[in-house]
């Protein structure tokens, strides 16, 4: 992770760091648990935030460093909290006079035995292949990943993308199963669009959470259809893609990893297909199937949902798209 | 922006408070403490105010007790008896989610860890979130297992934007356990001091 952060070319050591993860250093914690069972002592496991402090020290970041953990929406929630921190007035933390204040967001998770046993117990793992939005989808595949990005209010050079809007909302219905009415995700999406001053037809691509489970993908289908279904013609609605069929569900890293991919998609103007999808169960979704799709992209909506009904949505926009929108 | 803050701080050794509403009990004792606190703070909240309430909690240990429970359940017979219910709780955000579900709070939720400053960070971030997300209220504070086995510590504030019209909730009895999260300790001490200044109500 230190290597990832160093590649971000921070302009100042006075940046802040937010680390997003669901289980953190779980292997180390399990080792402590097992050791306590064998020979109890007075030692304590490291605080959950220890890795954030260690990472900040390793890369020379002097601003606040802490962990955000909101299940599988951790990556997007951390990105949003970083944006809030930069927008705080008075500032949440100090910086050298005239220096651009920056925040670094890092997300990671390791799908080791602990996590794998848990999802097996939940019967959530696919015995075949993760196929988001497919009518015969049968579960998710786990993945381990780390991602990092740097955000600032006043970029010194042309940024890769603009974070033009965001939203967060809870289902408030069930501790594990998503709300089948998708009420939380719909609220988060609508807040993100309103903040970005966009209407549903302005969104060119929805980068779904797309875990490949029956319940999550059904919920997301409801959310996307509810928000964008008023646009006539499925081919006029935003394209929909998801990548967990390729990279797996990387848990707390997923939101940020897929946001970084969304930025790359905006740069290259090519949308990857939903890996593993053969036959969609909701034909009203404009899913990208089989082959990459070259298309004009100005605004991408990225969403994520997690256990406990925690939903997050961000709008990523090309720089010139934001300029036009403000002029309008 | 925030001109009113009412709070409840409570920590217990072992047994839970005798007056816990049965509807607010959880399989997790720490969650039960937090639900009890939040129940006191949210008493009387109108339904149309619930969607503008955020939840921001700080924790140093994450889901440690739940992790222990799940790990114990998965060790026998190649995890054949791994408990799905126990695994579902192995997330630091479980408490915040449980508050949202039990009290029907569909607003934003954040769980963070900043070591010994977790509770203070939670309150700071809560103020930030209220401003940037247009929230009217926010439950903010810290919760953790205590230093001694079977003890739990929690402190919770109910933050209200100055435009809020919902009446304040009175503080509750406080009992300190061993220090753990230093900022949580400071939060609870402030609650106790405020309680003492207010006198009996």
Image (spheres, rainbow, N blue to C red):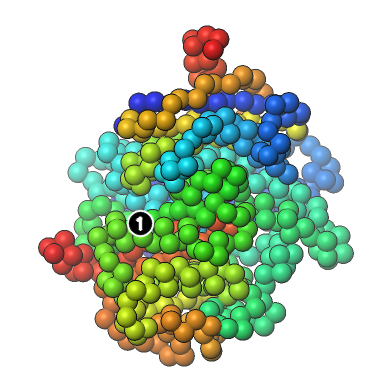
Q: Residue at x 70, y 42 (%)?
A: B26
**Where does the C terminus of chain A fall, quadrant-wise?**
bottom left
Q: Residue at x 73, y 26 (%)?
A: B18
Q: Chain of mark 1?
A: A
Q: B183 or B35: nearer the eye?
A: B35
Q: Residue B166: x percent and y percent?
A: 42, 30
Count of all numbered marks drawn on residues in the image = 1
Q: Residue pushed farthest right? A: B77
Q: Residue B151: x percent and y percent?
A: 71, 30
Q: Which residue is mark 1?
A: A191
Q: Residue B107: x percent and y percent?
A: 45, 48
**A275 displayed left or right of A288:** right
Residue B200 appears anywhere in the view: yes
Q: A306 or B53: nearer the eye?
A: B53
Residue A105 appears anywhere in the view: no
Q: Residue pushed farthest left? A: A327
**A193 displayed left or right of B53:** left
Q: Residue at x 60, y 73 (%)?
A: A213
Q: Is residue A8 above or below residue B160?
A: below
Q: Residue at x 37, y 83 (%)?
A: A234
Q: B81 or A21: nearer the eye?
A: B81
| Secondary structure category for the residue under label 1 | helix
Q: Residue B94: x percent and y percent?
A: 61, 48
Q: Is the residue marked by circle 1 packed among few (<14), some (14-19), or many (20+) residues within 10 Å?
A: many
**A95 displayed left or right of A21:** left
């Amino acid at each position: 992770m230190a290597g990832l952060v160093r590649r971000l070319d921070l302009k100042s050591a006075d940046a802040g760091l937010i680390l997003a993860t669901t289980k953190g250093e779980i292997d180390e914690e399990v080792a402590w648990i097992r050791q306590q069972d064998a020979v109890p002592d007075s030692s304590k496991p490291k605080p959950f935030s220890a890795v954030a402090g260690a990472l900040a020290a390793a890369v020379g970041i002097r601003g606040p460093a802490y962990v955000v953990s909101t299940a599988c929406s951790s990556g997007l929630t951390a990105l949003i909290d970083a944006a809030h921190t930069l927008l705080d007035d008075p500032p949440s933390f100090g910086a050298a006079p005239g220096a651009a204040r920056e925040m670094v967001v890092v997300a990671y998770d390791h799908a080791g035995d602990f996590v794998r046993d848990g999802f097996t117990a939940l019967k959530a793992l696919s015995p075949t292949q993760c196929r988001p939005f497919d009518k015969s989808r049968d579960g998710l595949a786990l993945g381990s990943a780390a991602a990092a990005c740097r955000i600032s209010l006043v970029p010194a050079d042309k940024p890769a993308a603009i974070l033009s809007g965001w939203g967060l909302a809870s289902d408030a219905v069930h501790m594990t199963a998503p709300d089948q009415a998708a009420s939380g995700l719909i609220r988060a999406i609508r807040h993100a669009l309103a903040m970005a001053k966009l209407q549903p037809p302005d969104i060119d691509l929805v980068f779904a959470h797309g875990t490949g489970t029956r319940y999550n993908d059904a919920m997301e289908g409801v959310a996307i259809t509810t928000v964008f279904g008023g646009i006539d013609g499925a081919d006029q609605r935003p394209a929909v893609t998801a990548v967990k069929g390729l990279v797996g569900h990387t848990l707390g890293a997923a939101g940020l990893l897929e946001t970084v991919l969304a930025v790359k998609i905006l740069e290259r103007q090519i949308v990857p297909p939903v890996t593993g999808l053969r036959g969609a169960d909701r034909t009203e979704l404009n899913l990208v199937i089989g082959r990459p799709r070259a298309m004009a992209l100005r605004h991408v909506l990225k969403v994520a949902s997690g256990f406990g009904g925690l939903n997050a949505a961000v709008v990523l926009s090309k720089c010139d798209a934001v300029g036009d929108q403000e002029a309008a | 922006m925030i001109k009113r803050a009412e709070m409840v701080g409570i920590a217990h050794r072992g047994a839970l408070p005798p007056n816990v509403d049965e509807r607010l009990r959880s399989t997790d004792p720490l969650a039960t403490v937090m639900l009890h606190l939040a129940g006191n703070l949210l008493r009387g909240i109108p339904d149309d105010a619930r969607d503008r309430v955020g939840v921001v909690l700080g924790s140093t240990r994450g889901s440690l007790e739940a992790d222990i429970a799940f790990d114990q359940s998965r060790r026998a017979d190649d995890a054949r008896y791994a408990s799905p219910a126990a695994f579902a709780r192995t997330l630091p955000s479980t408490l915040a989610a449980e508050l949202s579900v039990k009290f029907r709070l569909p607003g934003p939720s954040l769980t963070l860890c900043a070591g010994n400053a977790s509770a203070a960070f939670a309150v700071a971030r809560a103020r930030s979130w209220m401003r940037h997300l247009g929230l009217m209220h926010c439950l903010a504070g810290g919760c953790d297992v205590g230093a001694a086995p079977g003890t739990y510590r929690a402190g919770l504030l109910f933050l209200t934007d100055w435009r809020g019209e919902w009446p304040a909730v009175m503080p509750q009895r406080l009992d300190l356990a061993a220090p753990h999260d230093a900022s949580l300790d400071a939060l609870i001490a402030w609650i106790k001091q405020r309680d003492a200044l207010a006198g009996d109500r």
